[in-house]
Image (spheres, rainbow, N blue to C red):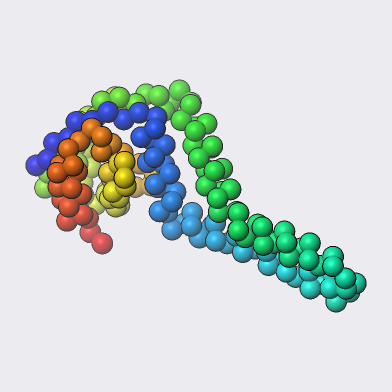
Amino acid sequence: MISLNFNVGRDDMMAFSKAFHDNSPTVQAAVRRAQWIFPTMMLLASAYFYFRYGGFTPLIFLLFGGLWFAFYPAYFRRHILRTTEKIMKEASHEKAFGAYSVILDEEGISSVSPTGEGKYKWDAVDRVLLTSDHLHIFLAGPVGYPIPRREVEEEVIQKVKSFVESKIKK
């Protein structure tokens, strides 16, 4: 059994959301699809204008397609972060900030938070991710525990990560 006590604030929730979106296969597929569709249309338009009219006009389409391809992923990440910041400012999220007490045992994860108590079996845990600032335990969807590394000893963080990984069914 491992017991953790930590505080979760707005920055921790933002980091959790960012980690979720950065590691979501669905989000990554949508970004790749959007990254390629517009440049492909610009390539087709460029070919049409080149064969129809010639000249330098087709280069404009190629330029815009290349810029889109290069900068769209960064734009999308900023858009997601801005949207998440707006959502975090809503009153309902303020209720989730505060002290958390989490217990990990053979049965699963039990927690006490500002919004109540919860108990999750290991089947509910999707994955665990260690970043430079947090240990994220993801449950179903963008729900879980952003455990700040600044509040928990490094030895305990590593122990929790290993323990959760051993319990997750791949």
Q: Position of residue 107 (x, y in %)?
A: 13, 46
Q: Looking at the image, which residue is at 49% across and 54% down?
A: 27
Task: Pinpoint residue 36: horizontal percent, then vertical percent.
Answer: 61, 64
Which residue extends farthest bottom? 51
Q: Nearer the viewer, residue 120 or 167?
A: 167
* 11 horizontally vs 64: left or right: left
Q: Residue at 39% of width from left, 44% of height from top?
A: 142
- Position of 64 compared to 72: left or right? right
Q: Residue furthest left?
A: 1
Number of numbered discs on residues: 0
User: Can residue 163 be seen in this snapshot?
Assistant: yes
Compared to 15, does 128 lie above or below? below
**Where is the C terminus found, in terms of image quarters?**
bottom left
The residue lying furthest to the front in this view is 56
Near-viewer residue (56 or 108): 56
Residue 88 position in % (x across, y down): 46, 30
Residue 16 drawn above or below residue 161: above
Q: Is residue 136 visible?
A: no
Picture coordinates of residue 62 (x, y %)? 73, 65
Q: Is residue 121 left or right of residue 105?
A: right
Residue drawn 39% across the image and 32% down it: 11
Q: Which quadrant would the N terminus be assigned to in this image?
A: top left
57 over 161 or under it: above or below = below
Residue appearing at x 67%, y 62% in the figure: 66
